[in-house]
Amino acid sequence: MKTIIEPFKIKSVEPVYFTSREERKQILSAAHYNPFLIHARDVIIDLLTDSGTSAMSSEQWAGVMRGDESYAGSESFFRFENSVRNITGMPFIIPTHQGRAAEKILFSICGGKGKYFVSNTLFDTTRANIEFSGAEGIDLLCEEGKQPALVAPFKGNINIQALEQFIQEKGAENIPMVIITVTNNSGGGQPVSMENVRAARQVCDKYGVRLFIDACRFAENCYFIKKREKGYADKTVLAIAQELFSYADGCTMSAKKDAFANIGGFLALRNEQLAMECRNLLIITEGFPTYGGLAGRDLEAIAIGLEEVMQEDYLQYRIRSIEYIGEKLDAAGVPYIKPTGGHAVYLDAKAFLPHIPVHQYPGQALCAALYIEGGVRGVEIGSVMFGKYAADGSLIPAQMELVRLAIPRRVYTQSHIDYVAEVIVEVFRNRDQIKGYEITYETPLLRHFTAQFREV
Ligand code: F0G
């Protein structure tokens, strides 16, 4: 088999700015050891997120020029609506300026005190929007998903037994919906199987609970289904996606991921009454229902991106490029969540830095070390992001201490990725010298974005 190459050529480039190790030490200290506070220009390879960081295609840029900026009834909206309807099969399509805006609208209507939103794993902003409404977010990830070193095909699955038990315990009337995140971002970018979604649908039907999909990375998830699940090898990614969404009552989507757009999102719904309520809120917060906080050109870029993302030469390259980093890490014995997921590599900071206790945030320490070593920016997904405090002020740690290196779509080449692997391996060789961190400043909600740290 020959090398799987990038299925695109480069038409327009952006410079990478280089810094020395000494400069990076200064920069990181000035940013209080929080990668979110570093200027992007001071980053050599930016793996903070795959969100909004994609390179758009020449077709998408052409679409940007074609964008119809009419306030109402824009042609671009109808192209966008068609594209989303074709994939989701849902009649009511509501554009929003990004994923969390769709979440905010949905949970403002369906949430509230005493309610529970049950998921395989909720992403941080999704959880925050649920909690902001007064409701509680519950993660019921399958057991395989909790073991970083275990290789299993669908580690993003929801625990069906636990789901049914939870519904019986709390009462279906208190559970506005089950939300399945595909792929499971906070749990390693791991996919969810079609069988699992079908089983979740059956439980939801039995108790009369709605099923929603957080669809940010639906194409990557569907490609994993094609490759790993029996009966899907000969189906197109579009057909697999159509089946996936057929089990859902609605979905929220950030078009900043699997739609190759730099901004955008949507809510897709089957229920007309709920769609009406969502549109009312949309008009107050986002805009008229045919643009929802976006420019016509953005709707156009999303419509085209949604079609491009399902092309199999792209998905093969995409999944392979992540797997490739995993192989390099395996060769050096670096611990990470196995197998590699769809959009990122998740280093297992607890195993990487066993000498740093969880209350000294090994993930944060690893992020700092990667930046100093090679100007690589990743993000902690561990107790900084998801930790809570007990009544006595002690830390209730997250389930896992991870560092996510998310790969922007169609942005970096193989040599960039080789460089990243070299940086990780070098940090791993010198891991004994890495120290823990303590928090010197934090906010009550989503503290990871603005927290400040000091080396212990
Ligand atoms: N759901 C999931 C699974 C996500 O990964 C994100 C964003 C959102 C919802 C919210 O979408 O950013 O458009 O408002 N994840 C980004 C990330 C920020 O870095 O993983 P948004």
Image (cartoon, rainbow, N blue to C red):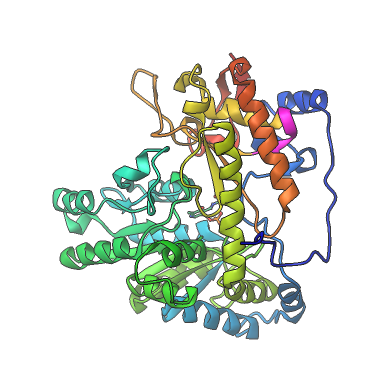
* Residue drawn at x 44%, y 36% as measured from the top left: 386
Which residue is at the far left?
Answer: 168
Q: Position of residue 234 (x, y in %)?
A: 44, 76
Task: Examine the rendered structure and indicate whether residue 128 appears above or below residue 57.
Answer: above
Give residue 389's quadrant in the image.
top left
Question: Residue 454 or 219: which is nearer the viewer?
Answer: 219
Q: Position of residue 61 (x, y in %)?
A: 75, 73
Task: Examine the rendered structure and indicate whether residue 386 appears above or below residue 441.
Answer: below
Give residue 318's quadrant in the image.
bottom right
- The answer to whether residue 207 is magenta is no
- The answer to whether residue 375 is magenta is yes
Task: Examine the rendered structure and indicate whether residue 322 appears above or below residue 110.
Answer: above
Say if residue 139 shows up in the picture.
yes
**Residue 243 horizontal side relative to residue 23, left or right:** left
Which residue is at the far front?
Answer: 1
* Residue drawn at x 76%, y 77% as measured from the top left: 62
Q: Position of residue 96 (x, y in %)?
A: 55, 66
**Residue 171 horizontal side relative to residue 382, left or right:** left
* Residue drawn at x 69%, y 40% as measured from the top left: 420
- Quarter of the picture containing the C terminus is top right
Residue range highlighted in magenta:
372-377
- Quarter of the picture containing the N terminus is bottom right
* Residue drawn at x 65%, y 45% as measured from the top left: 47
